[in-house]
Structures are given as structure tokens and as C-alpha cells.
Image (spheres, rainbow, N blue to C red):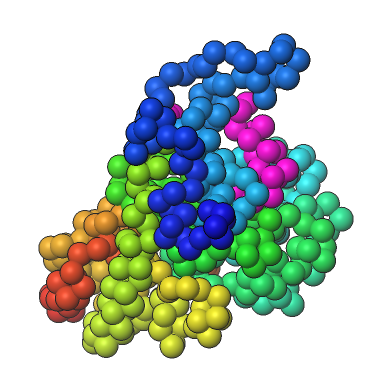
Amino acid sequence: MNIKDRKLDTKLIHAGEPNPRVQGSVAMPVFLSSTFEYSGDGTAGYDAVRYARLSNTPNHVALHEKLAALENAEAALVTGSGMAAISAALLGVLRAGDRLIAQRCLYGGTHGLVTRDLAELGIGVDFVDASDPSTFAAALRPTTRAFYVETLTNPLLELADLPAVAAFCRASKLVSIIDNTFASPVNFRPIEHGFDLVVHSCTKYLNGHSDLVAGAVLGKAELVAAATRKQNHFGGCLNPDTCALLHRGMKTMALRVRAQNQSAFALAHALVAHHAVAGVNYPGLESHPAHARARTLLDGFGGMLSFELAGGLDAAERFLAALTIPIVAPSLGGVETLVIRPATSSHVGMGEAERKKLGIAEGLVRVSVGIEATSDLIEDFEQALDRAS
């Protein structure tokens, strides 16, 4: 059976591995050479040059093949960070004078990129409610080239009408781009639902150990090639030893993410039941506005949630100080549970008024559930909530 026909768990272990194995090594070796012996005929250009900045060392190639296999993509590219992946993907399809349609609530770094940095390059953005397909056509202009969404938004865990987004893009001849970081390939594979390009911050669930920074772009071969050309010139490549760490981390992703799904589901229900909690954002809750859609689209509800305390900002600060297991730190997707206020981390670049408009309260707490014992986490959250109320 071809590796493309195997289950995701098997692809994580075996896709992209050297065949034959390098000197019989079971683990993928780390190729620390920045450059490789030239093997071209002098006319092939970049295709004949193997150089770390071009993301074509053996470590890069192995990762590209593994990533593409996970989401059934034609091609993939690893990058120096999640933002490098997003930048390369967007700049691969947008030029001066073009416009982008984007989901209204995005990760703060992405929001800053599309509203400020792209604007400086002469690229405009139009925001829509991606849960309401009736708003899409009004944002479409003759110069619109792409539509950008997140599978689950950071930090409110919104789930857009993703099939409608993909269908609208096909009908309007737009490139559909989706950030699948929060869901991971374990819970959602966008290309199977009609998306053209997928971006990841591999720093998060793909690696899962909070010890590297990386990103990825995957999807149609010509679009990945366009992103690769941008990265080759902007220099946002991933070094080979970090490639090797990511390669290793990915192999346990299915086990980690499924455990995180289960714990986050239990924790979300415990939080809903606590008197000190005013509201919980988690697609696995029946109260979530897109719960029915989540049950249809997702293989798991994810390890991310956010919530507000009834006592507001002061109560949130007391809650964070009272926790004993989670670490108060940005980022997500690691084996340890992390908690943070988005107003001081992922969305700190926005003004308070802008955050409020998007529904991101100053006291909102975002949780990345790790793989600790679920009962220990729930007990710790409950005692911290009791002390905060």
C-alpha cells in the first residue's frame, strides 16, 4: 500500500523518510552542511543547487514530504516561523494593487501584517464575517485575489463556514488560504475540504514541545512554489538542526493532540459549571455558536479554549496567580498547559478599543491544554477560580 493511502498516524512515522535509509539509520540524520556538491549541468539554475537557504537539504526535503502527506497536499515548504509561512503564502499570491478578503477576528500578528505591512506594499484588505457567507460577495472587488481564514480563531475559537469559504473562492477564482495551527492535521485537513493553501505555526502542535520556532506552507504545487520563491529571497528559511527537531516532534503529534482534545473537552465543561466563570469559548460545547458545524467538520474539538471570569480583569489576574500547574506564558500546543491573557500577548499590538470591537475582553484568559492528568488540571483550575472569585 502506498504511504499516501495510510492512516495519519502511520504517515507521521513513515512519510518522507529516506528510502533507502541513510547508512541504515532508523532516525533521520541531521545534515549540518550549509551547502552541497553541485550536480547540475550549468543550465538548471536553482533546481541543481542544494543550499540551506533554498530549503532543499535532505532534512528539508524529508519534512516537506511528511507535511504534504499529512494533509494530502501536492507540496509543502517549511519556514523559519509561523509568521514567515503566512508572509510567504500571502506574498506569493498578492501584488501591489491587489486586495485580500480576510476573516474579521485573526491572530494579532496576522492582523498587523495584513492591515499595516501589506498596506505599505499597496495591498488592501477587506474584513468579513466568515461565518456568514452572505457577506462575502459585498467584499469582492475586481482586484481581489485571495481569501484568508483560520480554522479555529485565536483567541475566541470561532469556527467559520469553511466549506462556504472554499466554495466562494472556487466560484470567484480566488486563492483560499487557511491557518490550520489551532486544529492541526489531526483534527482538520483543509485541502480535503477544498482549500488551496494551508499555513501552520509548527512551533505549536506539529512540534509540541515548546523548544523550537518554525512554520509551514502546504497545498497546490504552483502556489507552494510561489511561496518558496518569496522565502528564498526574504531568507526566512529553517535551519537543518531545527528541521530535525521538528521531524522528531511530529511523530508523536497524533497521540498528543488526541489526549489534549479529551482534556480540553473535560476542562471546558468543568469551567462552564463553575460560578466564577462568565463564559467559555470552546467548539466542543453545545453552547458554542458553531457546535453543529464543528461536529461535522472536525475530527476533534482541539486543545485550545478561552474564557472570561465574572469578576473581569482583576479576577482574571487573581486566577492566573493562583494556578499551580499551568505556566503563564504565550504560545500553545506544547505538552505543558499554558495560560495567558491575549490582551498582553497574542493581541497586544491592537488597541483596547479594537480588541473590544472584536470581542476580546481585557480579562479574557486563553488556555492551551497540555497532556497532564485531566483530573489534576480540573482540580487546579477550580481552586484557582475559587480564590479569584
Query: Is residue 143 among what the camera can see?
Result: yes
Residue displayed at 82% across by 58% down: 173
Q: Which residues are magenta?
A: 216-242
Does residue 219 show up magenta in the picture?
yes
Q: Please, is residue 56 above or below residue 140 in the view?
A: above
What is the x, y in percent for residue 344?
35, 54
Q: Where's the C terminus, which quadrant?
A: bottom left
Closest to the observer: 92 or 14?
14
The image quarter in which residue 105 lies? bottom right
Q: Please, is residue 329 above or below residue 135 in the view?
A: above
Closest to the observer: 17 or 98?
17
Chief secondary structure of the magenta portion: helix
Residue displayed at 63% across by 35% down: 228
Closest to the observer: 100 or 303?
303
Residue displayed at 76% across by 15% down: 43
Using residue 234 as the reference point, say whether residue 252 is left or right of it: left
Using residue 378 as the reference point, say whether residue 192 is left or right of it: right
Q: Please, is residue 146 above or below residue 314 in the view?
A: above
Q: Where's the N terminus, which quadrant?
A: bottom right
What is the x, y in percent for residue 371?
25, 63
What is the x, y in percent for residue 349?
46, 50
Using residue 105 as the reference point, say whether residue 142 is left or right of it: right
What is the x, y in percent for residue 118?
66, 43
Does residue 49 show up magenta in the picture?
no
Query: Is residue 103 among what the camera can see?
Result: no
Residue displayed at 50% across by 81% down: 295
Using residue 224 as the reference point, say whether residue 361 is left or right of it: left
Closest to the observer: 162 or 40?
40
The image quarter in which residue 103 lies? bottom right
Number of dots carrying numbers: 0
